[in-house]
Amino acid sequence: MNTAKLPGAIVIGAPKAGTTTLCDSLARHPDVYMYPKKETHFYNTYYHSRGMEWYLSLFKDAPSHQLIMEGTPDYAMSNCIERTIPRIHQHNPDTKLIFMVREPVERIESHYVQMLSNHREIVDQPTAFQKWPEIIDSSRYHQLMQVVLKYFSPKQVHVIFLDQYAQNKRVIHAEVAEFLGISNADTALDSMEFDEHSHKRENQGMDGVLLATLRKSRHYDKLNMLTPKPIIQLGKRFLRRKISVSSRLEDSVKQSLTKQLSNDWAQFKQQHRQSK
Protein backbone atom coordinates (compact mmCIF):
# COMPACT_ATOMS: atom_id res chain seq x y z
CA MET A 1 0.00 0.00 0.00
CA ASN A 2 1.06 3.63 -0.62
CA THR A 3 1.21 4.64 3.03
CA ALA A 4 3.15 7.85 2.37
CA LYS A 5 2.38 8.88 -1.18
CA LEU A 6 0.77 12.09 -2.35
CA PRO A 7 -1.59 12.29 -5.34
CA GLY A 8 0.10 12.00 -8.70
CA ALA A 9 -2.68 14.13 -10.17
CA ILE A 10 -5.34 16.50 -8.85
CA VAL A 11 -8.50 17.82 -10.49
CA ILE A 12 -8.37 21.43 -9.26
CA GLY A 13 -11.52 22.90 -10.83
CA ALA A 14 -13.43 24.71 -11.94
CA PRO A 15 -16.54 24.38 -9.77
CA LYS A 16 -19.68 23.43 -11.71
CA ALA A 17 -17.71 22.45 -14.82
CA GLY A 18 -18.14 18.68 -14.91
CA THR A 19 -15.47 17.60 -12.43
CA THR A 20 -17.74 15.12 -10.65
CA THR A 21 -18.45 13.20 -13.84
CA LEU A 22 -14.75 13.19 -14.77
CA CYS A 23 -13.67 11.99 -11.33
CA ASP A 24 -16.35 9.30 -11.30
CA SER A 25 -15.02 8.10 -14.66
CA LEU A 26 -11.39 8.16 -13.54
CA ALA A 27 -12.30 6.25 -10.39
CA ARG A 28 -13.36 3.37 -12.64
CA HIS A 29 -10.03 3.22 -14.49
CA PRO A 30 -7.94 0.20 -13.42
CA ASP A 31 -4.79 2.31 -13.08
CA VAL A 32 -6.33 5.02 -10.85
CA TYR A 33 -7.05 5.29 -7.15
CA MET A 34 -9.43 8.23 -6.80
CA TYR A 35 -10.11 9.36 -3.23
CA PRO A 36 -13.57 7.81 -2.65
CA LYS A 37 -15.19 11.07 -1.56
CA LYS A 38 -13.54 12.89 -4.50
CA GLU A 39 -12.98 16.16 -2.60
CA THR A 40 -10.50 16.35 0.29
CA HIS A 41 -10.50 20.15 0.70
CA PHE A 42 -7.06 19.81 2.26
CA TYR A 43 -5.23 22.68 0.60
CA ASN A 44 -8.09 25.17 1.01
CA THR A 45 -9.75 24.20 4.32
CA TYR A 46 -7.85 21.63 6.39
CA TYR A 47 -4.25 22.61 5.63
CA HIS A 48 -3.48 24.06 9.06
CA SER A 49 -6.07 22.31 11.21
CA ARG A 50 -5.32 18.72 10.14
CA GLY A 51 -1.89 18.72 8.57
CA MET A 52 -0.06 16.56 6.07
CA GLU A 53 -0.25 13.37 8.10
CA TRP A 54 -4.05 13.49 7.91
CA TYR A 55 -3.93 14.16 4.17
CA LEU A 56 -1.62 11.22 3.54
CA SER A 57 -3.90 8.96 5.58
CA LEU A 58 -6.70 9.53 3.06
CA PHE A 59 -4.75 7.54 0.47
CA LYS A 60 -3.41 4.75 2.68
CA ASP A 61 -5.61 2.14 0.99
CA ALA A 62 -4.31 2.89 -2.51
CA PRO A 63 -2.74 -0.16 -4.21
CA SER A 64 0.89 0.44 -5.12
CA HIS A 65 0.28 0.07 -8.87
CA GLN A 66 -2.42 2.76 -9.06
CA LEU A 67 -2.08 6.50 -9.63
CA ILE A 68 -3.43 8.34 -6.59
CA MET A 69 -5.84 11.17 -7.36
CA GLU A 70 -8.27 13.54 -5.71
CA GLY A 71 -10.58 16.22 -7.10
CA THR A 72 -11.38 19.40 -5.18
CA PRO A 73 -12.72 22.05 -7.59
CA ASP A 74 -12.60 24.72 -4.89
CA TYR A 75 -8.80 24.73 -5.27
CA ALA A 76 -9.27 26.86 -8.40
CA MET A 77 -11.88 29.21 -6.97
CA SER A 78 -10.81 32.83 -7.16
CA ASN A 79 -10.89 33.28 -3.37
CA CYS A 80 -8.74 30.16 -2.79
CA ILE A 81 -6.31 29.79 -5.66
CA GLU A 82 -3.65 32.19 -4.37
CA ARG A 83 -3.31 29.90 -1.34
CA THR A 84 -3.99 26.46 -2.73
CA ILE A 85 -1.68 26.37 -5.74
CA PRO A 86 1.46 27.48 -3.83
CA ARG A 87 0.66 24.91 -1.14
CA ILE A 88 0.22 22.12 -3.66
CA HIS A 89 3.52 23.07 -5.29
CA GLN A 90 5.33 23.27 -1.96
CA HIS A 91 4.42 19.72 -0.99
CA ASN A 92 3.89 18.08 -4.36
CA PRO A 93 5.76 19.95 -7.12
CA ASP A 94 5.74 17.04 -9.57
CA THR A 95 2.00 16.40 -9.48
CA LYS A 96 -0.18 16.89 -12.55
CA LEU A 97 -3.22 19.17 -12.55
CA ILE A 98 -6.48 18.92 -14.49
CA PHE A 99 -8.52 22.10 -14.96
CA MET A 100 -12.03 21.74 -16.39
CA VAL A 101 -13.84 24.82 -17.65
CA ARG A 102 -17.31 25.67 -18.87
CA GLU A 103 -18.77 28.61 -20.78
CA PRO A 104 -18.27 31.34 -18.15
CA VAL A 105 -21.84 32.60 -17.76
CA GLU A 106 -23.32 29.10 -17.72
CA ARG A 107 -20.91 28.20 -14.94
CA ILE A 108 -21.92 31.32 -12.98
CA GLU A 109 -25.60 30.37 -13.19
CA SER A 110 -24.89 26.94 -11.74
CA HIS A 111 -22.45 28.24 -9.13
CA TYR A 112 -25.02 30.75 -7.88
CA VAL A 113 -27.44 27.98 -6.88
CA GLN A 114 -24.63 25.98 -5.29
CA MET A 115 -23.67 28.93 -3.11
CA LEU A 116 -27.26 29.25 -1.89
CA SER A 117 -27.14 25.60 -0.93
CA ASN A 118 -23.73 25.86 0.73
CA HIS A 119 -24.70 28.86 2.83
CA ARG A 120 -28.34 27.87 3.50
CA GLU A 121 -29.45 31.33 2.47
CA ILE A 122 -31.81 32.47 -0.29
CA VAL A 123 -30.67 35.77 -1.78
CA ASP A 124 -31.28 37.30 -5.18
CA GLN A 125 -28.57 37.27 -7.82
CA PRO A 126 -27.31 40.88 -7.45
CA THR A 127 -26.99 40.39 -3.69
CA ALA A 128 -25.28 37.03 -4.13
CA PHE A 129 -22.75 38.41 -6.62
CA GLN A 130 -21.89 41.22 -4.22
CA LYS A 131 -21.73 38.97 -1.18
CA TRP A 132 -19.80 36.17 -2.90
CA PRO A 133 -17.74 37.76 -5.72
CA GLU A 134 -16.04 34.42 -6.32
CA ILE A 135 -19.20 33.29 -8.13
CA ILE A 136 -18.22 35.56 -11.01
CA ASP A 137 -14.47 35.71 -10.52
CA SER A 138 -14.10 31.92 -10.66
CA SER A 139 -15.09 32.16 -14.34
CA ARG A 140 -12.03 34.30 -15.12
CA TYR A 141 -10.13 31.26 -16.31
CA HIS A 142 -7.24 33.03 -18.01
CA GLN A 143 -6.56 35.04 -14.87
CA LEU A 144 -6.76 31.94 -12.69
CA MET A 145 -4.48 29.98 -15.02
CA GLN A 146 -1.78 32.62 -14.63
CA VAL A 147 -1.61 31.72 -10.95
CA VAL A 148 -1.29 28.02 -11.78
CA LEU A 149 1.46 28.63 -14.34
CA LYS A 150 3.50 30.65 -11.86
CA TYR A 151 4.14 27.37 -10.05
CA PHE A 152 3.59 24.54 -12.53
CA SER A 153 4.87 24.09 -16.06
CA PRO A 154 2.34 23.92 -18.91
CA LYS A 155 3.28 20.25 -19.37
CA GLN A 156 1.88 19.55 -15.90
CA VAL A 157 -1.51 21.11 -16.60
CA HIS A 158 -4.28 19.62 -18.73
CA VAL A 159 -7.34 21.69 -19.69
CA ILE A 160 -10.73 20.18 -20.52
CA PHE A 161 -13.64 22.15 -21.98
CA LEU A 162 -16.98 20.85 -20.75
CA ASP A 163 -18.75 21.22 -24.09
CA GLN A 164 -16.14 19.06 -25.81
CA TYR A 165 -16.27 16.56 -22.95
CA ALA A 166 -20.05 16.29 -23.25
CA GLN A 167 -19.81 15.74 -27.01
CA ASN A 168 -17.21 12.97 -26.95
CA LYS A 169 -16.19 11.64 -23.57
CA ARG A 170 -14.20 8.76 -24.98
CA VAL A 171 -11.87 11.06 -26.93
CA ILE A 172 -11.34 13.25 -23.86
CA HIS A 173 -10.82 10.21 -21.63
CA ALA A 174 -8.13 8.96 -24.02
CA GLU A 175 -6.39 12.34 -23.90
CA VAL A 176 -6.58 12.44 -20.12
CA ALA A 177 -5.17 8.92 -19.90
CA GLU A 178 -2.24 9.90 -22.10
CA PHE A 179 -1.62 13.01 -19.99
CA LEU A 180 -1.69 11.00 -16.76
CA GLY A 181 0.48 8.22 -18.14
CA ILE A 182 -2.14 5.52 -17.58
CA SER A 183 -3.52 2.99 -20.04
CA ASN A 184 -5.63 4.31 -22.90
CA ALA A 185 -6.35 0.85 -24.26
CA ASP A 186 -9.95 0.18 -25.28
CA THR A 187 -10.58 -2.02 -22.25
CA ALA A 188 -9.39 0.73 -19.90
CA LEU A 189 -11.48 3.39 -21.64
CA ASP A 190 -14.49 1.05 -21.60
CA SER A 191 -14.17 0.81 -17.83
CA MET A 192 -14.55 4.59 -17.50
CA GLU A 193 -18.00 4.63 -19.06
CA PHE A 194 -21.10 4.62 -16.85
CA ASP A 195 -24.71 5.77 -16.76
CA GLU A 196 -24.64 9.32 -15.50
CA HIS A 197 -27.06 10.74 -12.98
CA SER A 198 -27.98 14.38 -12.80
CA HIS A 199 -25.68 16.51 -10.68
CA LYS A 200 -27.85 19.60 -10.95
CA ARG A 201 -27.89 21.52 -7.71
CA GLU A 202 -31.57 22.34 -8.17
CA ASN A 203 -32.31 18.64 -7.66
CA GLN A 204 -29.99 18.30 -4.68
CA GLY A 205 -31.50 21.07 -2.58
CA MET A 206 -30.45 22.80 0.61
CA ASP A 207 -29.59 21.29 3.98
CA GLY A 208 -32.50 21.03 6.37
CA VAL A 209 -32.09 22.01 10.02
CA LEU A 210 -31.05 18.52 11.15
CA LEU A 211 -28.39 18.04 8.46
CA ALA A 212 -27.07 21.57 8.97
CA THR A 213 -26.73 20.84 12.70
CA LEU A 214 -24.95 17.56 11.99
CA ARG A 215 -22.45 19.31 9.72
CA LYS A 216 -21.41 21.55 12.62
CA SER A 217 -20.57 18.56 14.79
CA ARG A 218 -16.86 17.95 15.30
CA HIS A 219 -17.46 14.30 14.43
CA TYR A 220 -19.26 15.00 11.15
CA ASP A 221 -16.22 14.81 8.84
CA LYS A 222 -15.05 11.52 10.34
CA LEU A 223 -18.56 10.08 10.06
CA ASN A 224 -18.83 11.33 6.48
CA MET A 225 -15.54 9.66 5.54
CA LEU A 226 -16.62 6.30 7.00
CA THR A 227 -20.14 6.24 5.57
CA PRO A 228 -20.59 4.60 2.14
CA LYS A 229 -21.52 7.02 -0.62
CA PRO A 230 -24.91 5.39 -1.41
CA ILE A 231 -25.96 5.79 2.23
CA ILE A 232 -24.95 9.45 2.19
CA GLN A 233 -26.92 10.07 -0.99
CA LEU A 234 -29.99 8.36 0.47
CA GLY A 235 -29.74 10.42 3.65
CA LYS A 236 -29.53 13.66 1.73
CA ARG A 237 -32.77 12.84 -0.08
CA PHE A 238 -34.58 12.99 3.25
CA LEU A 239 -32.53 15.65 5.03
CA ARG A 240 -32.40 18.31 2.32
CA ARG A 241 -35.14 20.60 1.09
CA LYS A 242 -35.64 21.75 -2.46
CA ILE A 243 -34.34 25.15 -3.52
CA SER A 244 -37.19 26.93 -5.25
CA VAL A 245 -35.11 29.48 -7.14
CA SER A 246 -34.07 29.65 -10.75
CA SER A 247 -30.43 29.72 -11.74
CA ARG A 248 -31.31 31.48 -14.98
CA LEU A 249 -29.87 34.97 -15.24
CA GLU A 250 -31.90 37.86 -16.56
CA ASP A 251 -30.95 38.74 -20.13
CA SER A 252 -29.48 42.10 -19.12
CA VAL A 253 -27.32 40.49 -16.43
CA LYS A 254 -26.20 37.76 -18.82
CA GLN A 255 -25.23 40.31 -21.46
CA SER A 256 -23.32 42.36 -18.90
CA LEU A 257 -21.40 39.34 -17.62
CA THR A 258 -20.66 38.09 -21.12
CA LYS A 259 -19.15 41.45 -21.99
CA GLN A 260 -17.26 41.63 -18.71
CA LEU A 261 -15.71 38.19 -19.17
CA SER A 262 -15.28 38.14 -22.94
CA ASN A 263 -11.61 39.16 -23.11
CA ASP A 264 -10.55 36.69 -20.44
CA TRP A 265 -12.54 33.88 -22.10
CA ALA A 266 -11.13 34.67 -25.53
CA GLN A 267 -7.55 34.66 -24.23
CA PHE A 268 -8.08 31.39 -22.44
CA LYS A 269 -9.60 29.66 -25.46
CA GLN A 270 -6.87 30.95 -27.74
CA GLN A 271 -4.20 29.42 -25.53
CA HIS A 272 -5.84 26.18 -24.47
CA ARG A 273 -8.68 25.10 -26.75
CA GLN A 274 -8.06 22.46 -29.38
CA SER A 275 -10.37 21.27 -32.15
CA LYS A 276 -11.84 17.82 -31.50
Image (cartoon, helix red, strand yellow):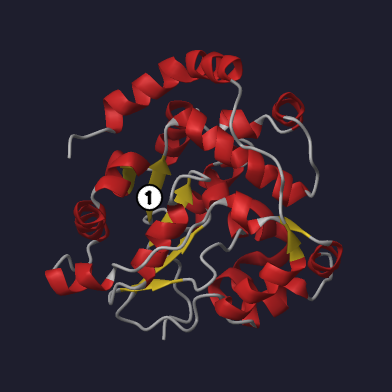
Q: Nearer the viewer, residue 145 or 245?
A: 245
**What residue is at 33 percent from the left and 40 percent from the top?**
163
Residue 182, percent from left and from top:
23, 66
Name the residue rendered at 40%, 45% in the picture: 99
In the current view of this chain or complex, which residue is farthest to the left?
185
Residue 153 seen in render: no
Residue drawn at point x = 85 percent, y = 68 percent:
210
Residue 182 drawn above or below residue 3: above
* Above or below 217: residue 172: above
Q: Is residue 174 above or below residue 28?
A: above
Which quadrant would residue 95 be assigned to in this image? bottom left
Q: Nearer the viewer, residue 142 or 48?
A: 142
x, y percentage for residue 176? 26, 55
- Of residues 100 and 81, the one drawn nearer to the viewer in this rendering: 100
The crowding category of the residue bearing disc 1, from other C-alpha atoms within 10 Å (few below 14, some 14 to 19, many at least 20), is: many
Residue 181 placed where, x, y %?
Answer: 22, 62
Q: Give the amino acid at mark 1.
A: Ile
Q: Residue at x 40, y 44 (%)?
A: 100
